[in-house]
C-alpha cells in the first residue's frame, strides 16, 4: 500500500471538478479518482477492466485493459 501524495489529492480534486462540470451525478469523488490521480502522479501503469474514467480524466496514465 502506498500513501497518496498531496499532488495526487489535488489532481483528484481537479478531475472530480471536471466530472461535475460535465453533469456528473456523484456527490463525492469515487475511489477511481484517487487511484487514477495517484497513478498519474507516480507515473504508474494501471490495470483495470473499466478504463473509461482513467482514460477520460487521467490521459497520461498508461491503462492496461485485458479484453
Image: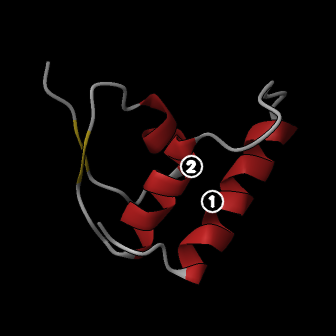
Q: Give x and y (percent) for residue 16.
A: 72, 48
Instruction: State if disc 1 and disc 2 touch (CB < 8 Å).
Output: yes
**What residue would you read off at disc 1?**
12
Q: Give x and y (percent) for residue 57.
A: 56, 47
- Tell me: 17 left or right of 35: right
**What residue would you read off at disc 2?**
33
Residue located at (72% from left, 60% from top):
13
- Tell me: 20 left or right of 16: right
Above or below, 7 relative to 34: below
Q: Label 2, secondary structure: give it.
A: helix
Mark 2: give few (<14), some (14-19) or many (20+) Cα within 10 Å: many
Residue located at (37% from left, 32% from top):
51
Give the quarter of the figure containing the C terminus. top left
Residue at the limit of the structure toward the front, as seen here? 1
Residue at the limit of the structure toward the left, as seen here? 66
Quarter of the figure with residue 47: top left
Residue 38 versus residue 67: which sits nearer the camera? 38
Which mark identifies residue 62? none
Mark 1: give few (<14), some (14-19) or many (20+) Cα within 10 Å: many
Amino acid at each position: 500500500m502506498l500513501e497518496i501524495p498531496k499532488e495526487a489529492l489535488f489532481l483528484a480534486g481537479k478531475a472530480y471538478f471536471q466530472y461535475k462540470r460535465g453533469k456528473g451525478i456523484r456527490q463525492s469523488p469515487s475511489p477511481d479518482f484517487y487511484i487514477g490521480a495517484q497513478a498519474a502522479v507516480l507515473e504508474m501503469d494501471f490495470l483495470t477492466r473499466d478504463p473509461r474514467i482513467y482514460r477520460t480524466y487521467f490521459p497520461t496514465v498508461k491503462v492496461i485493459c485485458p479484453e
